[in-house]
Amino acid sequence: MSWIDQYPDDSMAGAFEAIGPDPVKSVTAAAFREAMSRLGAAVHVVTSDGPAGRIGFTATAVASVSDQPATLLVCLNRRSASAPALATNRVFCVNTLRADEEAIADVFAGRTGTREERFLAGHWVTLVTGAPVLASAFVAFDCRVIEIKAVASHNVVFGAVEDVRLGPPGPVLVYHERAYKRV
């Protein structure tokens, strides 16, 4: 039985074709989420602007891929409202939040406020790609989409880093054990 037969969700179609015909075995979703909650991760607001409009979401699934050429990745649930807009806009900025920016994290996570109010939080500028850059961010990576891969329920969005904006040093916001912490 293939992965698709085990989980016949349309968003999964084709997600594991590169792995092969054998079924994918994993722990339960609940066990995985509990284990992942124990990994501390920097909190980022990922933003985009372009033909599909201005969007943004809070993310911890961000990683460096390479420094030559400078590339990073962001993981985003394909069912989120931001996924099609990001794919259409083809640019994004990863804004790493400072320790005192929990309110910004919450509004972009949809915990407070409305989608329309997201960009009222903070002061926004742009760099090379035109994606919104949080002026107070600890660091901002201005990226152009180079590839989007569907894996399980998420898109892995690879971006070429076209510009970087370094903020002043200081503590950053981290999400660990389902709570914000300052590091």
Image (spheres, rainbow, N blue to C red):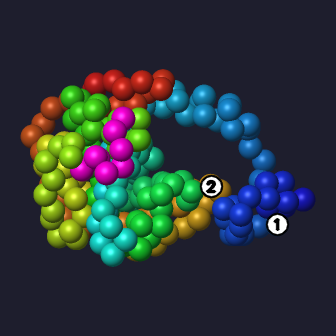
Residue 161 in sight from this viewpoint:
no
Total label count?
2
Residue in the picture at 29% in, 66% down: 49
Whether residue 39 is visible: yes
Mark 2 element type: loop
Which residue is disc 1 drawn over?
A: 21
Q: In this view, does 125 lie to the left or right of 98?
A: left
Q: Which mark is residue 153?
A: 2
Above-or-below relation of 114 to 128:
above
- Give the image quarter of residue 167: top left
Q: Is mark 1 on a helix, strand or loop?
A: loop
Indicate the amino acid at tag 2.
Answer: Ser
Sequence-first disc among 1 and 2: 1
Magenta-colored stretch includes residue 16: no
Q: What residue type is labelled 1?
A: Pro
Residue positioned 12% across, 36% down in the render: 169
Q: What stretch is highlighted in magenta?
A: 112-119
